[in-house]
Image: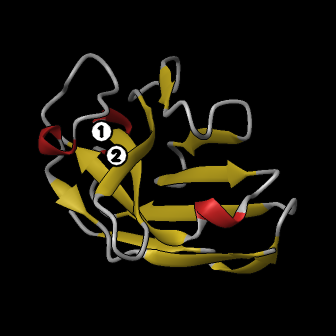
């Protein structure tokens, strides 16, 4: 499974940005997908996750109400729509896939099997 994240860039505080993560594999619709981020000098942290059907999502408290995770199984793609961005959202964002049929969308990075290369998001104040 290969994951390709894109959509990062520089945005002003308060603005929106949408990240995409395209996945290879014929069974994408079975994968649980997640987004994580790592800010400079900080540990990796969970952002959001979505179940295989899209019916269940989970968000970190820091992004709840501002970020929305969604997926299009026909396009093998998961999205992270980010709104009301803050300077503290500046980080490298990574998508991840869990491919063993987990029945929920976890926030534990150890549950994920494959990782994308990351896309950089910079929010200027």
| 95 relative to 13, above or below | above
Q: Residues within 10 Å of mark 1 (few under 14, many from 20)?
A: many
Cα separation, mark 1 vs mark 2, equals 5 Å
Which labelled disc corresponds to residue 120? none
Residue of label 1: 31
Q: Which mark is residue 28?
A: 2
Q: In the displayed structure, would residue 98 be above or below residue 114?
A: above
Q: Would you say the residues marked 1 and 2 are in contact, meaning their CB atoms lie under 8 Å apart?
A: yes
Where does residue 79 sit, x and y in percent of width and height? 59, 52
- 25 relative position to 22: left or right: left
Percent position of residue 22, x then y: 46, 64
User: Would you say 115 lies left or right of 75 here?
Assistant: left
Drawn side of residue 98 relative to residue 9, left or right: left
Q: Is residue 19 visible?
A: no
Give percent across and percent down for residue 95.
38, 58
User: Element type at marker 1?
Assistant: loop
Specify the quadrant of the image occupied by residue 111: top left
Say if residue 32 shows up in the picture: yes
**Image point (46%, 24%), residue name:** 53
For the point 50% across and 42% down, which residue is it?
73
């Amino acid at each position: 499974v290969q994951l390709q994240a894109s959509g990062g860039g520089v945005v002003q505080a308060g603005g929106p940005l949408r990240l995409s993560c395209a996945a290879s594999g014929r069974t994408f619709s079975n994968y649980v997908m997640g987004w994580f981020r790592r800010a400079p000098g900080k540990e990796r942290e969970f952002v959001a996750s979505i179940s295989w059907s899209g019916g269940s999502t989970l968000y970190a408290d820091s992004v709840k109400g501002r970020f929305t995770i969604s997926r299009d199984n026909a396009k093998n793609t998961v999205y992270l729509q980010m709104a009301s961005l803050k300077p503290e959202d500046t980080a490298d964002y990574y998508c991840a896939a869990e491919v063993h049929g987990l029945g929920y969308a976890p926030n534990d990075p150890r549950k994920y099997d494959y990782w994308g290369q990351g896309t950089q998001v910079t929010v200027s104040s």
